[in-house]
Image (tube, rainbow, N blue to C red):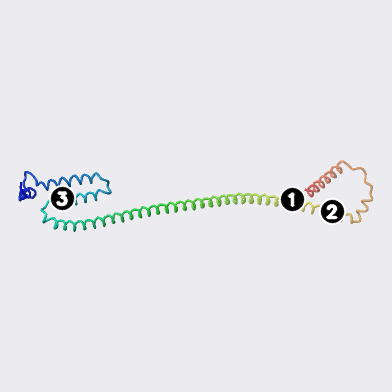
Amino acid sequence: MDAGEAGLETFPPRASAARQPRLLAALEAQLRDALGAATRASAGGELCMALHAHAEAFDAFIQGFPAPYRPFLSSIKSTFDAAVSGGVTCGMGNLDLRERLRESRLAERAAVRAERARIIDAGGEARRALHARIAAARLRQSRAAEQAARARKDAAAALDAAALASQRLASCREAAARLAAAAAAEAAWEARPVAAALCALEAGPLGTQEEQDLAAELAAAAGGLAELRA
């Protein structure tokens, strides 16, 4: 097969349903194998490996053309490679920026959680301190109420004692008034002229009725003295 026939084999003038051109079949197989390897790669390098596989397939495609076309096709590929490289660089920069933004958001969320926890803890401390003050105030109030109740009880007892003392004082005053009246009456009687004559009389033994009257008077006098002493 000469060069012309080889070119027709590589670039047939009409598409054949029976079989593909050799170059197309080889390029598809090469790209398929490279993409399979890229898929099996790590997630971080899959995109770069896929782009590299397409670039190699493009190079193989250019090399399949006759020599006069290759510089032109290579310049086109270089332009596309530069654009793709710039896009990849920009994309990687965007990935880095997104990663920094993600880390910044995570740090901000962590700071917010920490601040929220601090506020909650501070609020808990304040509530505990407030509850302690309330409990202390209630204890003081309870003790003050007990002291007030004891003071009212003591005041009532003092009032009762004062009332009893007032009653006893009134009774003593009445007894003293009676004794004073009796003493005044006795002094008035002794001042009368008949008292001296009666005192000069010699009294004989007391009769039964006189003894009873005297005993009654002595008992009354003893009761008055007892009230005065009380």
Q: What amino acid is labelled 2 in the image? A: Ala
Q: Position of residue 210 (x, y in %)?
A: 86, 44
Which badge, 1 or 2, comes first in the chain's sequence?
1
As helix, strand or loop, the secondary structure at mark 2 comes to helix
Residue 168's tag is: 1
Query: CA gap, disc 1 to disc 2?
Result: 22 Å
Residue count near mark 1 (Cα–Cα under 10 Å), binned few <14, some 14–19, many ≥20 = some
Residue 60: image tag: 3
Q: Is residue 21 left or right of residue 130?
A: left
Q: Which residue is mark 2?
A: 183
Residue 217: image x %, image y %?
83, 46
Task: Identify the residue at image location x=20%, y=56%.
Answer: 81
Quadrant assignment, res 71? bottom left
Between marks 2 and 3, how big is the CA–CA gap? 159 Å
Neighbour class for label 2 at 10 Å: few (<14), some, many (≥20)?
few
Q: Nearer the viewer, mark 1 or mark 2?
A: 1
